[in-house]
Amino acid sequence: MIYKSSIRSLIEYGDIVWTGGNIGDLEKLESIQLDAARVVTGVTARCSTSLLIEDVSWPTLPSRRWVHRLTLFYQIVNGLSLPYLINLIPQHVHERTRYPLR
């Protein structure tokens, strides 16, 4: 609970913006989650990371970033987001032409 409320919230703050960042930096963030999982479970550093993540059943940070991006895009497309974000999406073809299209 402490990790999810205090640490992971800091790691994920603004993750939609910096998702395309340096791969090395993103891997450092993932290692923070692995270290927290080791503390929670009490295993050593020699334990397999895939078994560790499976044991704590936490989603990986890249998968959480993917969900956050999809959620934001859904909000933008459906008009549930801020107007300046909604204006970034181009109009549908049928909205910008007067010709009947199939």
Image (cartoon, rainbow, N blue to C red):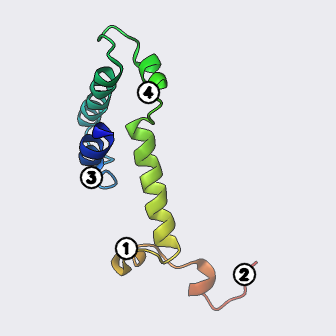
**Left/right of residue 22 with respect to residue 79 in the rendered view:** left
Considering the numbered disc 3 on the image, is that residue within a helix, a strand or a loop? loop
Amino acid type at image mark 2: Leu
**Residue occupied by mark 4:** 56
Query: x, y (%) of residue 51?
Result: 46, 17
Q: Residue at x 47, y 22 (%)?
A: 55
N-terminal of the pair, mark 3 or mark 1, is 3
Query: x, y (%) of residue 90?
Result: 48, 75
Q: Nearer the viewer, mark 1 or mark 2?
A: 1
Amino acid type at image mark 4: Val
Residue 21, numbered circle: none
Q: Residue at x 24, y 41 (%)?
A: 7
Q: Alpha-carbon neighbours of circle 2 within 10 Å: few (<14), some, or many (≥20)?
A: few
Q: CA distance from mark 3 to mark 2?
A: 43 Å
Amino acid type at image mark 3: Tyr
N-terminal of the pair, mark 1 or mark 4, is 4
Q: CA distance from mark 3 to mark 1?
A: 18 Å
Query: x, y (%) of residue 62?
Result: 40, 39
**Residue occupied by mark 3:** 13
Considering the numbered disc 2 on the image, is that residue within a helix, a strand or a loop? loop
